[in-house]
Image (cartoon, rainbow, N blue to C red):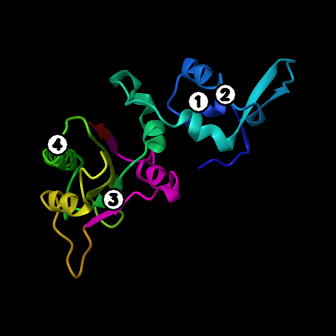
Amino acid sequence: MLTNEWYTKIEILKLYPISSSTYKQRIKNIDPTKTKFITSKSGSPTRYIHHSVLDELFRKRRRLSKKEHNQTIKWVRNHYWSYFGDVVPGSSNVDDLKNKMRHLFGELKNLQMEKNQLTLFYAIEKNTEDKYYHTHFLIDCAEDMLVAEDIVDKLELICDPNSYKEGRIYLKEYDLTYEKGGAIYNSKEKRYFYEVLG
């Protein structure tokens, strides 16, 4: 979530998964009322960009390459997701959950009509009450490719279904009015392991 009114290039590069050259390219046609220059102590001017245009300028981008792994969290937080949720199996360790999430991705891919229309991000976190782990996830898919019921059916292949006493599966459509809150929560950097599939 943005907290300042104006942002410098350095601050923007910390928030968005872009390079300096991409930054320069995207500000070429910026609305002049949304940028200003302030002279620094060294005498050189520093450009500031208004927060209201940051997402429009910098949020959208292609998928990450393998060499950009260090940009993963920034990319996840700025990507447009379709669903978010979590699964809490009865007793899973980190390796077990990695296998389960990769299996889930394969099952969901089988539902798509066109290839490369699905992205799954997941992050594994330790349970607070016991020695086991659970997984938070985000799904991006082409519009109408997956419905919530299909995803829940596939989640029940890797986790016990919800019962009257326990909720093991949580899934919700990603409401963009929450802005980036769901993506930021699901990508907290204190996770044990995270991965983007797709």
Q: Secondary structure at mark 1?
A: helix
Q: Secondary structure at mark 4?
A: loop
The residue singled out by tag 3 in the image is: 85
Of circles 3 and 4, the one toward us is: 4
First along the sequence among labels 4 and 2: 2
- The vertical placement of 52 against 57, above or below, is below
Report the residue that reaches farthest toward the bottom: 164
Distance from Cα at disc 3 to Cα at disc 2 = 33 Å
The reply to whether dot 2 and dot 1 touch (C-beta < 8 Å) is: yes
Distance from Cα at disc 3 to Cα at disc 4 = 23 Å
Distance from Cα at disc 1 to Cα at disc 3 = 28 Å
Of circles 1 and 4, the one toward us is: 4
The reply to whether dot 1 and dot 3 touch (C-beta < 8 Å) is: no
Residue type marked 2:
Lys
The reply to whether dot 3 and dot 2 touch (C-beta < 8 Å) is: no
- Report the disc number at residue 13: 1
Q: Which residues are drawn in magenta?
A: 169-194
First along the sequence among labels 3 and 2: 2
Residue type marked 3:
Gly
Count numbered badges in the picture: 4
Q: Is residue 35 left or right of residue 62?
A: right
Kindly identify the residue that appears in the image at 57 percent across and 40 percent down: 55
The residue singled out by tag 2 in the image is: 9
Residue type marked 4:
Met
- Report the disc number at residue 113: 4
Using a 10 Å C-alpha cutoff, classify the residue at mark 1 as few (fewer than 14 neighbours), some (14 to 19) or many (20 or more).
some
Residue type marked 1:
Leu
